[in-house]
């Protein structure tokens, strides 16, 4: 069985890797391989700072003005980004998941969505973390427990880390991007080729965009953050995750103190998908939809 850290966290342990998972938002709060951090450690905080490691469902990112339309009727979600009036990060960011299954190197946590304001559907969301010798695999399974089709999307919010030095270079396996507007909602997609937003070759931290939505046309993808000594952490995402939110927090509250941190958020839909329909998966009654991503330490 997984251990407990005494802070409400679930400890997973393997021969070469360890992870800490919080029931709050089923968030991944630490991941170490051979003593190296692959995500910014935030295990000391009760809630995930900056949404660190949180699971985002039944939509990632924002819903404009916290409103959308279903079957001709306007749906009003709770406003969770008061500065701009949006609904942000889904419905589970402030929920505690329950442990459904546990083993020394694996845990599955689950939460229910049942007729929330602005989202009149019944879903079961189960998140499984499984350690690997060189990292971790994550799977999110969403089941429609209701009697009508339900629109769904999901994402995760890891802050990648490759060694102790904040200076690192990022490569994103994405060919299009969308610039954020005044209220953080992105504009239309454009090809990154020939622009300063092309991260298909490694770009140093100082030159990274601070907040941008990226997109890959098709297929699974691999993205990499590389430290000056050559150590890399690779984020792998299946073909469901076509969108990636890049966000640089100038002072994330990590266990090592405030530091600049890079979030690369795999998402199955872009921002405002409930309004645009882009990337939504319509779950039939009784259907389960599973998506996967993971992290790996890449040797020097």
Image (cartoon, grey):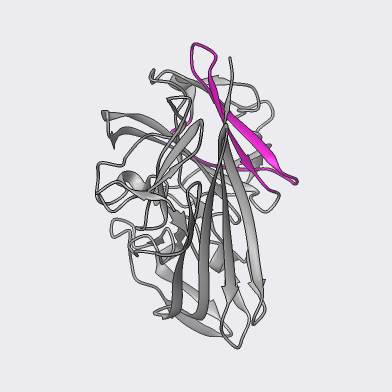
Residue 226 sits inside the magenta stretch: yes
In this view, the residue in front, 195 or 42, is 42
* Spot occupied by residue 154 in the image (x, y as percentages of width and height): 54, 59
In the displayed orientation, state which residue is furthest to the top: 229
In this view, the residue in front, 175 or 153, is 153
**In the rendered image, the vertical position of residue 8 relative to residue 153, given as above or below:** above
Residue 269 sits inside the magenta stretch: no
Q: Residue at x 34, y 71 (%)?
A: 78
What is the number of callouts on the image? 0
In the displayed orientation, state which residue is furthest to the right: 219
* Spot occupied by residue 71 in the image (x, y as percentages of width and height): 59, 85
Res 297 visible: yes
* Spot occupied by residue 85 in the image (x, y as percentages of width and height): 34, 62
* Spot occupied by residue 298 in the image (x, y as percentages of width and height): 59, 24
In the displayed orientation, state which residue is furthest to the front: 1
Residue 39 lies in quadrant: top left
Res 278 visible: no
**In the rendered image, the vertical position of residue 175 relative to residue 287, given as above or below:** above
**Range of residues picked out in magenta:** 209-238
**In the rendered image, the vertical position of residue 70 relative to residue 258, given as above or below:** below
Quarter of the image with the C terminus is top right
**In the rendered image, the vertical position of residue 250 relative to residue 1, given as above or below:** above
């Amino acid at each position: 069985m997984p251990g407990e850290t005494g802070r409400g966290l679930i400890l997973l342990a393997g021969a070469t890797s360890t992870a800490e998972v919080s029931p709050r938002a089923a968030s991944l709060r630490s991941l170490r391989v051979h003593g190296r951090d692959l995500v910014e450690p935030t295990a000391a905080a009760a809630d995930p700072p900056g949404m660190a490691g949180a699971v985002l469902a039944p939509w990632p990112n924002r819903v404009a003005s916290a409103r959308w339309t279903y079957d001709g009727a306007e749906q009003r979600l709770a406003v969770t980004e008061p500065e701009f009036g949006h609904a942000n990060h889904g419905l589970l960011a402030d929920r505690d998941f329950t442990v459904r299954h546990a083993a020394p190197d694996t845990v599955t946590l689950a939460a229910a969505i049942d007729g929330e304001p602005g989202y009149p559907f019944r879903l079961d969301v189960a998140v499984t973390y499984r350690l690997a010798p060189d990292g971790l695999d994550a799977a999110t399974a969403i089941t429609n427990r209701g009697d009508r089709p339900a629109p769904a999307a999901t994402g995760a919010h890891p802050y990648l880390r490759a060694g102790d030095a904040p200076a690192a270079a990022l490569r994103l396996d994405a060919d299009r991007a969308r610039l954020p507007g005044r209220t953080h909602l992105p504009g239309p997609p454009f090809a990154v080729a020939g622009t300063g937003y092309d991260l298909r070759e490694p770009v140093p931290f100082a030159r990274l965009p601070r907040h941008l939505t990226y997109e890959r046309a098709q297929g699974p993808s691999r993205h990499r953050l590389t430290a000056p000594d050559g150590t890399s952490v690779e984020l792998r995402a299946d073909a469901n995750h076509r969108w990636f939110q890049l966000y640089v927090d100038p002072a994330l509250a990590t266990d090592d103190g405030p530091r600049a941190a890079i979030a690369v958020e795999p998402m199955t839909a872009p921002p405002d998908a409930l309004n645009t329909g882009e990337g939504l998966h319509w779950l039939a009654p009784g259907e389960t939809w599973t998506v996967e991503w993971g992290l790996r330490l890449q040797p020097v």
